[in-house]
Image (cartoon, rainbow, N blue to C red):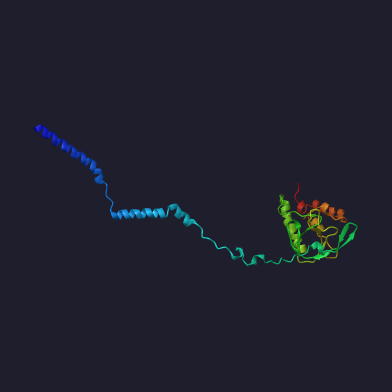
Amino acid sequence: MYQYILCAVLSVSAMSIGAQQLISPVLATPVPTKQAVSTQQQMATSHQMVKPETAMIQRNKPFPRPTPSHLLVGSSDLSLTRTVPLARVTSSIAEMAPYTTAGKTRMYQPIDVEVLDVMDRGEILVQTKEQVRIRGARVPSEKATRRVDVIYAREANDWLKKQLIGKKVILDFVDAPRDRYGALHGRFLLPDEKNADILQGLLTNGLARLNEEDLWESAPVKELKALEDKARREYKGVWSERE
């Protein structure tokens, strides 16, 4: 009898312990209050309204720029169609020299010119802002590879400035104002008793080499060669570098 009662008590206690183990996880979970529920709903709603990537795009979106009135369709603004007067174009120095025609050859008359500056390679800048080469002269350049040419390119530039700038100079195109490449070239003479030719002065001082292909038909070739040979023998200017 007592044995049956003991077994019943033990079975009831075992059932109660198992029920507590099943119920304890449920009781451990906190029950959200009404305030917590409303806060969570507001946060979820706000995340749905503005997503992070959407906010970034809106922040980086450029502001719309207003369209100028003269670009609008139907605009009456004609400011873009106004014409600006061009600067007065000065005629070429070659057009100022009178000439006579003998067969197919033109013979130009000397003209007075104003020398504004002397450029590299001895090119003369005249009042028309054109550069005219000294006919028959190979004036060294400051950009040359040989040191002697660089040195005497500066010497030639200084010498030409002293001879030409601020003085009345005569430009003689002789029979062609332009060479075969289209560049202006001519003789530059000083209006003294002998009408000294700048080419002869350059050759005498060794400040240029003779360019026979660029000489005019009636040029005194022998005399010019003699001047160059004399400067070479005396090691003047560009001929001062002894081999």
Q: Quadrant of the N terminus?
A: top left
163 lies above or below 211: below
Residue 87: x and y in percent read: 72, 66
Residue 204: x and y in percent read: 81, 56
Given the current orientation, which residue lies at the most extreme right position? 103
Identify which residue is drawn at 41% across, 55% down: 49
Q: Is residue 28 left or right of residue 128?
A: left
Identify which residue is drawn at 47% across, 56% down: 58
Nearer to me, 104 or 114 = 104
Q: Is residue 190 visible?
A: no
Residue 179: x and y in percent read: 81, 55
Residue 166 in which image quadrant: bottom right
Q: Is residue 107 left or right of residue 182?
A: right
Q: What is the tally of numbered marks visible in this picture?
A: 0
Given the current orientation, which residue lies at the most extreme left position? 1
Residue 12: x and y in percent read: 16, 38
Q: Is residue 178 left or right of residue 41?
A: right
Identify which residue is drawn at 49% across, 56% down: 60
Nearer to me, 56 or 96 = 56
183 lies above or below 80: above
Nearer to me, 145 or 182 = 182
Q: Is residue 121 visible?
A: yes
